[in-house]
Image: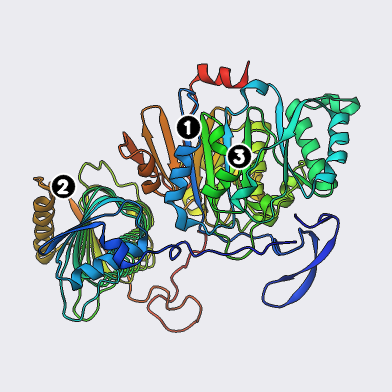
C-alpha cells in the first residue's frame, strides 16, 4: 500500500502554548529576558506580545539562531513602543511590518531586514543580507557594515513618512531597485571603490547617497547623478552623527558623496503601451 | 514501494494553462511526480575540513535542523566524502530498487561489466517512518572493459553504464557513483533522513546537504537532492528554467536526465565542462552565469572576445532562472549562484572548517564564532580545496 505524504507547515508544527513558553522568561518590572534557544519563529512573537500585555517594554532575546519574523505582529492601538535587543543571529524578515519599535541586533542579520516596516528603528551591529528595507515605508534601518543584493527595493515614502536606510560600508547589486521614495545612505567606510552595479534600476522616487567612488556605468539607466545642495549636506551630517553615536566611531563623512536620483517618475510608462510619455523614444534595453 | 515498471510507460501530462495534453517521456507515475519542474525555496549546506580530518553527521544535521523552515519534509539528502576508506579505489554505486526482485537483473548487468568486490544493503532504520522507501543497495566495483569500451576512460565507462541502468533497466536508479563518497537521500526532513540512513555511523571530511520545499511537484526518493555522477554531487536551491535546453544538449554527450528534477542537469554540466572539457571553475561560472551582453560590450577587446566565444560555444549550458548551488567532488567544494543572485548563499571559515550555506544562522548554529564570513556576488564562485596531502590519502594514489 502506498502511504500518502503529509505536507508539514514547518512554521506552525509543535508550537507550544504561552503557559509552557512563559517558563523560559525572566521578567523584572518592565524588562524581560527570553532564552530563544530552540524556540520557534511563532513562539518568540507570541511570547513578546504576551509580555507587552503584561507591562514589559524592554525585551532581551538571547541565543537567537535564525528565527524569522522577529518583532512582527507587535502592533498595538495604544501606540506602545518596545525596545528589543537581540543577541545572536536573527533569521529572515527581521522586523517585518515593524510598528514603531526599536530593535538592536548584536550580530549579523540575514535577508529581508525591515521588510515593509511601517515605523521604528532597526540597528544591526554587523552586516545584513539581501533585500534589506524592502518595501519599507517608514522608520529607520541602520547597518554597521555592508548589505547584500537589492537593498531598499521598492522603498516608498507616503503620507509624510520618509523611510531611511543607512549602511556603513557598501551594498551589492540592484541597490534601490524600483525605489519609489525614502532615502538610502551608503557611507562607504573602509570601501576603496563600490563594486555594486545596476544601482537604481527602475527607480522612480527617493534618493541614494553614496560616499566614496562610484562610476556612471554602475548606475542603472533609469537613475542618474543629482546635484548635492545644502539640504543634502545637512541631512548627511545628521546621518553621520547618528551613525557615529550608534557605533561609537568618528569621521564618518570623511569622503566625497554623490547623490543618485531617478531620471523620471514613470520609467516604464511606455514599456507595454505606445503613447505620449516622457520616456518616449528612449531605448529600453531588455538584454539583461 | 515505488510503483512497478515506471520507466517504459508513456504517459500524458498536462502542460501550462491551456490544458493541452502532450505525450511525455518516461515519467515516474503514481503520486510522486507529474512534471519536470521543481519550484522551490530549498536550503543547502556544505562543510569541508580542509586538512582532511573526518567527522560525523551531527554537525551538518544540526545546521539543517536550523533551516527547517526552508523545507517541508518532501525531500532531503546528504553527500558524504571520504566515506569508504576500505574501498576507496572502487566506484561505489548507490542504487535504489523499486523492490528487491529487480536486484537479480542488476547483479547480472554488473557482473558482466564490472568486477564487483563487495555489495550490501545500505543499512536503514525503517522505524523512522519515512513514507514508501525503496530498497537501497551499494556495490563497490571496478570497470571490466571489453571490445570498443576499452577506448573509454574509466570515468566515461562508468558514466555510460550508469546511464544504461538509469534509462534501460526498469525499477532501478543509480543515485551516486563516485569513489570514496556516497549520496543518501529520501523523502522527509533532513534530520529524519539522516536518522533513516543512520548517518551518524559514517565519517567524512566533507558533507553537503539539502532540504527541499517543492511547491509544484510532489517529492519522491530519486528526486531528492543531492544529485550525483561519478564523485560529483550538487545540492541546489531554486529553479532551472533552462532545464529543457540543458538536458537536450547534454544528451548529445551521453548524459541522460531520468530523475525528473531540474537539478540533475547540473551534475552532468559540471562533469562535462570540468572533467571532460577540463575548464576551471572560474570559466565554468562564466558559462553557467554569464555576464550580460551589456557588460560584455563594455569589456576590453580581449575580454569581450573571450566572453563572446564562451557564450556562443556554450549557449545551451547557460543556466537560467534563480539558483544557488553547492557542488562537491573529492578534494573540492564550491558555491555558485545565478548572475544576479536570486537565491542566497553565504560562506564562512573557522580554522580548518569551511562552510557554505543558504543562511548564516545555520553556520552559526554549528560554529558560533567564525574567522570570516563572505557573501559572494552573483555568478562569483567561492571555492575551497582539500590540502594536497589529504587528497592523496582520500583517493588512495
Name the residue tied to disc 2.
A255
> Which chain hosts label 3?
B
Figure check: A119 above or below B369: below
The reply to whether discs 3 and 1 touch (Cβ–Cβ < 8 Å) is no
> Which chain hosts label 2?
A
Q: Looking at the picture, how far across and down is residue B69, in whole percent?
A: 45, 58
Q: Looking at the picture, how far across and down is residue B306, in whole percent?
A: 56, 39
User: What is the number of the mark on residue B233?
Assistant: 3
Q: Decide: few, some or many residues near mark 2? Use Cα within 10 Å; few <14, some 14-19, many ≥20.
A: some
Element carrying mark 3 = strand
Left or right: where does residue A120 sit relative to residue B46? Answer: left
Q: Decide: few, some or many residues near mark 1? Use Cα within 10 Å; few <14, some 14-19, many ≥20.
A: many
Q: Decide: few, some or many residues near mark 3? Use Cα within 10 Å; few <14, some 14-19, many ≥20.
A: many
Element carrying mark 2 = loop
Front position in the image: A184 or B60? B60
Q: Looking at the picture, how far across and down is residue B111, in whole percent?
A: 86, 29
Front position in the image: B290 or A92? A92
Asked if residue A182 can be seen in this view, the reply is no
Left or right: where does residue B277 sit relative to residue B258? Answer: left
Residue at (40%, 81%) from the top-left corner?
Answer: A277
Badges 3 and 1, same chain: yes
Badges 3 and 2, same chain: no
Front position in the image: B266 or A68? A68
Residue at (51%, 55%) from the top-left corner?
Answer: B42
Task: Examine the image and state in which quarter residue A228 appears.
Answer: bottom left
First in sequence, mark 3 or 1: give its number: 1
Name the residue tied to disc 1.
B48
Residue at (32%, 36%) from the top-left corner?
Answer: B370
Rounded to the nearest whole Å, what is the CA distance between mark 2 and mark 1?
41 Å
Amino acid at each position: 500500500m502506498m502511504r500518502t505524504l503529509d505536507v508539514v507547515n514547518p512554521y506552525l508544527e509543535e508550537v507550544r502554548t504561552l503557559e509552557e513558553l512563559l517558563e523560559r522568561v525572566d521578567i523584572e518590572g518592565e524588562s524581560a529576558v527570553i532564552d530563544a534557544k530552540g524556540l520557534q519563529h511563532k513562539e518568540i512573537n507570541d511570547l513578546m506580545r504576551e509580555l507587552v500585555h503584561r507591562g514589559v517594554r524592554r525585551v532581551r532575546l538571547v541565543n537567537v539562531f535564525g528565527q524569522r519574523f522577529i518583532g512582527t505582529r507587535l502592533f498595538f492601538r495604544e501606540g506602545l513602543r518596545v525596545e528589543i535587543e537581540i543577541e545572536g543571529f536573527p533569521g529572515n524578515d527581521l522586523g517585518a511590518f515593524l510598528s514603531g519599535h526599536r530593535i538592536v541586533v548584536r550580530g549579523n542579520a540575514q535577508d529581508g531586514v525591515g521588510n515593509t516596516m511601517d515605523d521604528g528603528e532597526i540597528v544591526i551591529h554587523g552586516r545584513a543580507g539581501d533585500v534589506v528595507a524592502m518595501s519599507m515605508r517608514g522608520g529607520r534601518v541602520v547597518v554597521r557594515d555592508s548589505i547584500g543584493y537589492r537593498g531598499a527595493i521598492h522603498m516608498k515614502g507616503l503620507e509624510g513618512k520618509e523611510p531611511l536606510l543607512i549602511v556603513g560600508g557598501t551594498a551589492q547589486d540592484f541597490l534601490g531597485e524600483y525605489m519609489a521614495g525614502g532615502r538610502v545612505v551608503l557611507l562607504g567606510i573602509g570601501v576603496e571603490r563600490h563594486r555594486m552595479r545596476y544601482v537604481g534600476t527602475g527607480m522612480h522616487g527617493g534618493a541614494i547617497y553614496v560616499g566614496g567612488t562610484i562610476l556612471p556605468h554602475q548606475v542603472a539607466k533609469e537613475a542618474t547623478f543629482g546635484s548635492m545642495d545644502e539640504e543634502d549636506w545637512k541631512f548627511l551630517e545628521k546621518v553621520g552623527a547618528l551613525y557615529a553615536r550608534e557605533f561609537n566611531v568618528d569621521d564618518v563623512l570623511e569622503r566625497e558623496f554623490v547623490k543618485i536620483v531617478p531620471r523620471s517618475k514613470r520609467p516604464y510608462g511606455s514599456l507595454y503601451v505606445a503613447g505620449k510619455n516622457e520616456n518616449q523614444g528612449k531605448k529600453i534595453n531588455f538584454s539583461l | 514501494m515505488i510503483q512497478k515498471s515506471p520507466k517504459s510507460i508513456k504517459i500524458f501530462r498536462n502542460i501550462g494553462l491551456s490544458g493541452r495534453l502532450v505525450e511525455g517521456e518516461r515519467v515516474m507515475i503514481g503520486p510522486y511526480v507529474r512534471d519536470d519542474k521543481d519550484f522551490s525555496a530549498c536550503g543547502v549546506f556544505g562543510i569541508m575540513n580542509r586538512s582532511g580530518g573526518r567527522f560525523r553527521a551531527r554537525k551538518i544535521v544540526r545546521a539543517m535542523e536550523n533551516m527547517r523552515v526552508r523545507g517541508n519534509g518532501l525531500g532531503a539528502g546528504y553527500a558524504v566524502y571520504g566515506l569508504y576508506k576500505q574501498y576507496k579505489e572502487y566506484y561505489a554505486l548507490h542504487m535504489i530498487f523499486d523492490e528487491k526482485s529487480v536486484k537479480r537483473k542488476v547483479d547480472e548487468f554488473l557482473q558482466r561489466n564490472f568486477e564487483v568486490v563487495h555489495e550490501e544493503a545500505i543499512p536503514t532504520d525503517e522505524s523512522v517512518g519515512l513514507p514508501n522507501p525503496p530498497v537501497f543497495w551499494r556495490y563497490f566495483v571496478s570497470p571490466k572493459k571489453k571490445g570498443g569500451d576499452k577506448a573509454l576512460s574509466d570515468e566515461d565507462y562508468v558514466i555510460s553504464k550508469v546511464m544504461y541502468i538509469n534509462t534501460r533497466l526498469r525499477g532501478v536508479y543509480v543515485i551516486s557513483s563516485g569513489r570514496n563518497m556516497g549520496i543518501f537521500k529520501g523523502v522527509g526532513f533532513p534530520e529524519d533522513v539522516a536518522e533513516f540512513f543512520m548517518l551518524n555511523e559514517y565519517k567524512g571530511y566533507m558533507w553537503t546537504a539539502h532540504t527541499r520545499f517543492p511547491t509544484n511537484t510532489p517529492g519522491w526518493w530519486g528526486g531528492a537532492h543531492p544529485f550525483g555522477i561519478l564523485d560529483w554531487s550538487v545540492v541546489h536551491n531554486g529553479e532551472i528554467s533552462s532545464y529543457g535546453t540543458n538536458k537536450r544538449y547534454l544528451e548529445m554527450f551521453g548524459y541522460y536526465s531520468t530523475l525528473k528534477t531540474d537539478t540533475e542537469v547540473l551534475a552532468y554540466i559540471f562533469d562535462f565542462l570540468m572533467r571532460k572539457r577540463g575548464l576551471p571553475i572560474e570559466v565554468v561560472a562564466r558559462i553557467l552565469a554569464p555576464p550580460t551582453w551589456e557588460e560584455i560590450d563594455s569589456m576590453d577587446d580581449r575580454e569581450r572576445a573571450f566572453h563572446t566565444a564562451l557564450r556562443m560555444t556554450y549557449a545551451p549550458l547557460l543556466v537560467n532562472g534563480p539558483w544557488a548551488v553547492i557542488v562537491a567532488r573529492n578534494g573540492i567544494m564550491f558555491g555558485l549562484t545565478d548572475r544576479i543572485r536570486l537565491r542566497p548563499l553565504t560562506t564562512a571559515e573557522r580554522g580548518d572548517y569551511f562552510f557554505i550555506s543558504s543562511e548564516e544562522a545555520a553556520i552559526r548554529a554549528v560554529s558560533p564564532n567564525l574567522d570570516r564570513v563572505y557573501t559572494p556576488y552573483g555568478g562569483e564562485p567561492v571555492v575551497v580545496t582539500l590540502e594536497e596531502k589529504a587528497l592523496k590519502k582520500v583517493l588512495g594514489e
